[in-house]
Amino acid sequence: MKEKDSKEGELSADTPDFDSHNNLLPSGQNPPQSNAHDSMPPDFLKVENTLNADGKKIKLQLPLSCEPPGPNNKTKPKVWIIFGASGHMGQSLTRACLSKGDEVVAVGRINENTLESMQTTFPHPNCFNILCDVRVRESVSTVTEQALEKFKRIDVIANCSGYGVIGACEDQDEHEIRNQFETNFMGTVHIIQLSLPYFREQGAGRYLIFSSTSGALGVPGLGPYCAT
């Protein structure tokens, strides 16, 4: 039985040497000695020594908006318009906004809902229920006007409206195909075109447009839906 060249945990004389950059050193050359300070960042990279354009030291700090809501970081309630609020995603979003104290204009699909059914779904005092057909430009314009009349401003507009018909393209009639384009594509265009001037004048505003992976990955039987 051969004896080990070195004790466990020790390197043998034949073990190659590497420098700090993991480069192989020539035989017989010892790696340079390093100390603990070599891994420390230079002084000018330390936060407390960061300089501004005038050469003065500044202290870097995250804005208060990055902190969770609390007594010292109170959040201002936002005003939402949620198109398609009567659908599954729209209902969840509407309830989430109302639960945190926001004000919501819940827009239901005019062909599937009534104001009474919308008020039953969202009886919250901060919720203003209205019906709309996003395919009709004037209908979308009415929603924006009534939202401003009710809450005096708009902070976020969400579009959850949209649907798809399952079936081969050759089997879908022209009305259903056009209706998907009018709802999913033109409906979004109407919402943005009619509200963007207001957001620009206000100097603030956000859109939350719900989409689908079907827009990136074609799905058999959902040709028109994927296209929109």
Image (tube, helix red, strand yellow):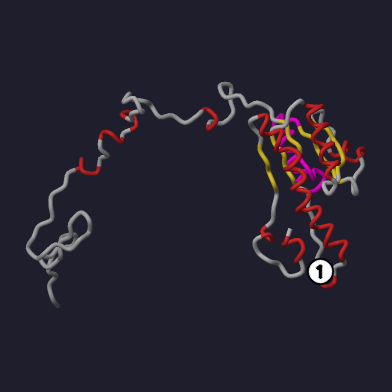
175 over 201 or under it: above or below:
below
Q: Which quadrant holds residue 174?
A: bottom right
Q: Is residue 220 magenta?
A: no
111 over 17 or under it: above or below:
above
Q: Position of residue 124 (x, y in %)?
A: 81, 31
Mark 1 surroundings within 10 Å by alpha-carbon count, few (fewer than 14), some (14 through 19), many (20 or more): few
Q: Is residue 100 magenta?
A: yes
Q: Name the side, left or right, on which 35 lies relative to 43.
A: left
Q: Residue at horizontal 83%, vertical 60%?
A: 178
Query: Which residue, as the protein is rendered here, is positioned at the far bottom?
Result: 1
Q: Which quadrant holds residue 25?
A: bottom left
Q: Which quadrant holds residue 201?
A: top right
Residue designated by label 1: 167
Query: Which residue, as the protein is rendered here, is positioned at the far left?
Result: 28
Q: Report the front residue among 136 and 27.
A: 136
Q: Residue at horizontal 72%, vertical 62%?
A: 226
Q: Name the side, left or right, on which 46 lies relative to 1.
A: right
Q: Position of residue 194 (x, y in %)?
A: 76, 39
Q: Secondary structure at mark 1?
A: loop
Q: Residue at horizontal 13%, vertical 55%?
A: 31
Q: Residue at horizontal 68%, vertical 41%?
A: 207
Q: Quadrant of the N terminus?
A: bottom left
Residue type at numbered disc 1:
Gly
Range drawn in magenta: 82-103
Query: Which residue, as the protein is rendered here, is positioned at the far top?
Result: 72
Q: Name the side, left or right, on which 35 lies relative to 76.
A: left
